[in-house]
Amino acid sequence: MSLTPVDGKRPSDGGGDGDDGRRKGRRRRALRWSAIVLAVVITGTAGAGYLYYQHLNHNIKKDPLNIGDEKDRAAESKANAAGQKPLNILLIGSDARDSAENQKLGGAKDTFGSAPRADVQMLLHVSADRSNMSVVSMPRDTLTDIPKCTDPDTEKKYAAETDVITNDSLGRGGPGCTVATWEKLTDIHIDHFMMVDFAGVVSMADAIGGVPVCVDANIYSHTSSGKGSGLKLKKGTTAVKGTQALQWLRTRYGFEDDTDIARTKAQHQYMNSMVRQLRENATLSNPTKLRSLAETATKALTVDNGLGTVAKLYDLSKELKKVPTARITMTTMPWEYSGSSGRVVPRTTDADQLFRLVREDIALDGKDKKKTATAVKASTDPAAADDEIAVQVENGTRTDTTSAVRGRATAVAQLLVGKGFKEAVADSSTTPSQATTIVRYPSADLEGDAQRVAKALGIPTSAVKKSTSVSGVTLVVGADWSTGTKYKAPAEDDTTPTSADALNGSDTTACMHVDPNYVW
């Protein structure tokens, strides 16, 4: 049976709220189980006191980290001046109906055993110095490119696809394909993944005594046509647990504009509150409750081999616990609608800005110290001699309103030759449209060469990018350098785009706006 739709347009039905236009018999409920994973690893609670119980290790399921092609992998994160590296962990929530418990929680009996989808995707970035943490959610209905993936169990190869819904990636060989998809989109190297399914949310919320959430009016997520999660809360703050916690995480109809974007916002509120509860709740010193929490969390997890034991998870949690709650920032990938389909695509400029901040280990709360050039360049392979570095120069000065500046690639290639790069040549076979000048390289062994070319021309290191679309070091002269022999780099904006809808981890005032049509 094919694991992906023929036309690449699977219905936007991942929620349990009955989306219009869903395929009959394929009612899915999008559950943000990443809240469990994030809370457990941040606090280290699940491991504390039971680290040495071997049976917990047997609970944890493992899968390969990345099952895409090696050429599509993002370059590894650089160490800072102190030799510390950031951590990037992809949190995945699966809608699998692969057990009686998951089927009961997820519903849709006719989907039992069908291919799972990655209805939750959140990138957790921990800074190299462990001073701050950023979380970037990708809306479930995002259209993106999924790279070629190979199922590690069956060796089945899935061809690359373009413009398909992101949650299909999980059904193309497992979580390693979702990791590969994120790396291709963001150019951020992912160190680990953690995936969790339906089972465990109810027990988790009960184990910590409930998770406080807030609504600004009485809400009942239910309609006569069967839409809605069933969530029914009074105005104000309620500590949700059990099934009610599950309903909060899956609610779409009733929050703000009844979209998946609003649901993501509610999940951020839940996650922040859950983290605070786990860090502060004294009831977790109770051995029985702690054991229950540990059992629940480890049974719900699938991780990459690098996190495949409780000891490794506990070591990770100790690193994450160093981050103060006040320096955790939750964001959503900036997006915009794609036509009238209800799907969304990355809002190019803002999304690129957010991904760059994460890639360069710049805190999203704006409280970071300026990174030094030395820190950025640490651990890069040495460059070859200037006269041995082959450079192709392309003319990217064309814009939406103007044609390319004639002879620009040749002029800059000659400039490079004059600086000692004798192997620099103009490539007139292509004229891309590039707003800002960029240097691309295809593999890690050429990164040093690319950075050397950038330095010679005064191009910032942040404009040196790995790309599988080039075969060697390639300089694309952008519209920002259409004349002259001296490149003036534009001032970089290191602020988080407002469209990322940032929420601070210590914010206790967050409250979901209720759609008046769902007020009781």
Image (cartoon, rainbow, N blue to C red):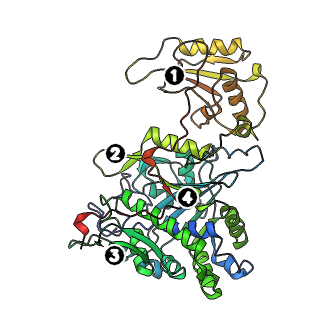
**Residue position marked by numbered label 1 in the rendering:** 480
Does residue 203 sit above or below 31 in this rendering?
below
Q: Quadrant of the C terminus?
A: bottom left
**Residue position marked by numbered label 2 in the rendering:** 338
Mark 4 crowdedness (10 Å alpha carbons): few <14, some 14-19, many ≥20: few
* Residue 406: percent from left, percent from top: 49, 11
Which of these two is toward me, 476 or 66? 476
Does residue 509 sit above or below 85 in this rendering?
below
**In this view, the mark in front (2 or 3):** 3
* Residue 303: percent from left, percent from top: 62, 66
Disc 3 to disc 4, how far (Cα)? 47 Å
**Residue position marked by numbered label 3 in the rendering:** 233
Which of these two is toward me, 336 or 22? 336
Does residue 33 sit above or below 283 in this rendering?
above
Image check: 139 left or right of 326?
A: left
* Residue 169: percent from left, percent from top: 49, 56
Does residue 370 sit above or below 102 in this rendering?
above
Mark 2 crowdedness (10 Å alpha carbons): few <14, some 14-19, many ≥20: few
Residue at image position (78%, 33%) is: 382
Disc 2 to disc 3, how far (Cα)? 33 Å
Image check: 239 left or right of 423?
A: left
* Dot placed on the residue nearer the N-terminal end, 4 or 1: 4
Please indicate, yes or no, whether residue 430 appears anywhere in the rendered image.
no
* Dot placed on the residue nearer the N-terminal end, 1 or 3: 3
* Dot placed on the residue nearer the N-terminal end, 1 or 2: 2
**In this view, the mark in front (4 or 1):** 1
Residue 279, disc: none
Residue at image position (30%, 44%) is: 339
**Disc count in the image?**
4
**Residue position marked by numbered label 4 in the rendering:** 156
Disc 1 to disc 2, how far (Cα)? 28 Å
